[in-house]
Every structure is written in structure tokens, then in C-alpha cells.
Image (spheres, helix red, strand yellow):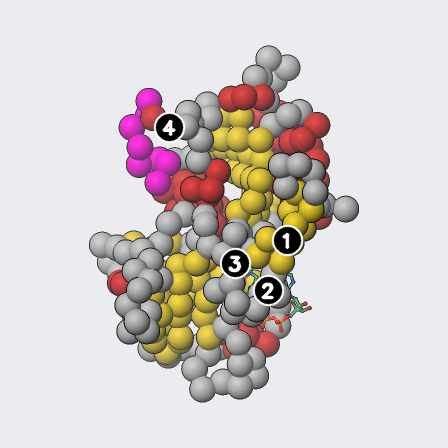
Amino acid sequence: MNSCDGSRKDVWSGEVVVAANEPIAESTWKVALDAPDFAALANPGQFLMLRLPECVDPILGRPFAVFDADPSTGRVEAVYAVVGKATSRLARLPVGAKLELWGPLGNGWRAAKRATPPKRLVLVAGGVGSAPFHMLVKELMARPERDRPDATYVFGARSENRLNCVDDFRRLGVDVRIATEDGSVGAKGLVLDVLPELFSETTDPRDVQIFACGPTPMLRAVAKWSAERKYECWTSLESPMACGMGLCFSCVVDWKNDDGTWDYKRTCVDGPVFDAARLKWD
Ligand SMILES: Cc1cc2nc3c(=O)[nH]c(=O)nc-3n(C[C@H](O)[C@H](O)[C@H](O)COP(=O)(O)OP(=O)(O)OC[C@H]3O[C@@H](n4cnc5c(N)ncnc54)[C@H](O)[C@@H]3O)c2cc1C
């Protein structure tokens, strides 16, 4: 099935089959779906909506970042933390079960595209905030070296048992740094404790882009840290949302206009990737 009147060629919706669904860390699962039409459309940083068929509680779909979408195999993957009703039910789905899927949705990291690519790109993830970076890193590492920014992936978690997908990123060949709050792996502390070692006093802010996804306190801290150094920072938000298509306005965030006045933007259609300097973090 595609969009009802065929007018949206960039969004697909239909029923898909679960090809794999396994725990990968504490309370964290990865689901793989056979969805070739969707896989052909997805861009790094976009998200998908999943709904449990014939389910009235919850009746709404839930948004998840596209972790991977491979047009050659038709496989689409998402990584999810089990936090409530939908994700608990999702974690109980066996291989062969059906799900309703629609997307890809949102702007993705292309919102941050510059005329001249940055020399230094730092990707900061916390928890399942790793998910929207996987396709981006895959795409970056497939470029010839001369066209690739110097990229580092920084992942933060509470403890070793919460680490997810780190090996996927290592396999792609990107420089990976880890911080855990209890020091069980990598640096002891928060992602913010790792960031200073990635830059020097001679770093030109114009050469830098920082992308971040994870819990709001982490995004707030990374946005503030970046602003203090005049580093451009883009954040991928996970504001709770109902429709994912711009209709319900349940996911609005405060957004600063050029003249300094405030407006609303919908995370689903205007985001989820936003220039952090335009968002209200207090
Ligand atoms: C664009 C986007 C991308 C996302 N990508 C991912 C992803 O890749 N992996 C992933 O695990 N999650 C992701 N999320 C969050 C995910 O959608 C929610 O965790 C999910 O909807 C929870 O559904 P549930 O029915 O299990 O929980 P519910 O029963 O609806 O809620 C359980 C608890 O979690 C809280 N909660 C629900 N949604 C959110 C949220 N978005 N932010 C903070 N707290 C919330 C509720 O307030 C409640 O306390 C994303 C959200 C957005 C908007």
C-alpha cells in the first residue's frame, strides 16, 4: 500500500512482517522488518511510525528513528527502549508477526547540510539516541576519504549493560568514544566529559558541527556547551507525538525566529532535527 491518492511519493505505509526482534542491552531491543518499499525511501535521521495491528491500547502508532534501511535487502531496523505499553508489547512480538508501518518521516540530518561540509563532525548519543546516527555514519564512511569530515561518535550510557549498537558503529570504522556514569566502560562520567578532548584551543568553530540525540538533559547540556564555544549544534528531538504527520500539533517545540520572537515548530514535520540555537532549553 502507498499513500491513498498516490500524491506522496516520499512516504510509504503498509503492513510489514517482523524478521527479527531481540534484546541487545538492558531494556533495549532491536527489531528488523521486511519493508523494501520503505527501505528505498529512508534518509539518515528520519523516523518511522509503528502500530500494533488490531490493538486499541495503545491505538496510536509510536515513533522510532530508522536505525538502518537497506534497499538491497529490503530490511529496516529500529532500536527501542522498553518504557511503556507499546514498547512492552513490541518486545513480545515473535518473528513473523505483523506491524503497521508508515514513513519515513521528518527532515533527518540533511536539515544540517552545509554548502561546505564541516571538517570536524562530532555525533553525540545517549541511550537509544544512538539509532538516528547509524545510517548517517554508514553514509559518511562510504564516501571517499577526501570527502569525509573527521568524524567521532560519542556514546553515553548509565552503565555497561546499557551500551547498545557500539559494535555496529565500530564495524563502520568511525572513531568511537564511550562514557559511562559508573565508569564500567570507557571514560567515567557523561558525554560532556569526553567532548573537550575532541577539540583544541586552535579549533576553528567554523569547521565544527555537533549532532546530538538522547535524553533532554543531555541535549540541553550539549547545546549549551556548543553555544559557549560557538560550535554549530543540531539536535534530534524525541518529543512525544501522536500522528507523526503534522496534523495533531502534540509535538510542538518553542523555536526562535530570525527577529528573536518565538514561534512553534512541529517535531514530526519541521524536525526532528533542529538547530539547537533556535530551541528553548530552559
Ligand atoms: C522522532 C522520534 C524518534 C524516536 N526514536 C526512538 C528510538 O529510536 N528508540 C526509542 O526507544 N524511542 C524513540 N522515541 C521515543 C519513543 O517514541 C517512545 O519511547 C515510545 O513512544 C514509548 O511508547 P510506549 O507506548 O512504550 O510508552 P508510553 O506507555 O506511551 O509511555 C511510557 C512512559 O514513557 C514516557 N514517554 C513516552 N514517549 C516519550 C518520549 N518520546 N520521550 C520521553 N518520554 C516518553 C511517557 O511519558 C511515560 O512516562 C522517539 C520519539 C520520537 C518523537
Q: What residue does disc 1 label?
A: 264
Residue occupying image coordinates x 40% and y 76%: 99
Q: Quadrant of ligand 1?
A: bottom right
Callout 2: 10 Å neighbours few (<14), some, many (20+)? some
Q: What residue does disc 3 label?
A: 268
Residue occupying image coordinates x 45% and y 50%: 107
Is residue 182 found left or right of 245 in the rendered image?
right
Residues at marks 1 and 3, CA–CA distance in whole angstroms: 12 Å
Q: Amino acid at mark 1?
A: Tyr
Q: Is residue 54 magenta?
A: no
Q: From the Cβ of disc 3, is ligand 1 less than 8 Å away?
A: yes
Which of the two discs, 2 and 4, labels the residue nearer the N terminus? Answer: 4
Q: Amino acid at mark 3?
A: Cys
Residues at marks 4 and 3, CA–CA distance in whole angstroms: 29 Å
Label 4 element class? loop
Label 1 element class? strand
Residues at marks 2 and 3, CA–CA distance in whole angstroms: 9 Å
Q: Nearer the viewer, residue 252 or 127?
A: 252
Label 2 element class? loop
Residue 41: x, y in percent? 31, 55
Q: Is residue 145 magenta?
A: yes
**Residue 100 position (above or below residue 25):** below
Q: Residue furthest right?
A: 282
Q: What residue does disc 4 label?
A: 148
Q: Which residues are magenta?
A: 139-146
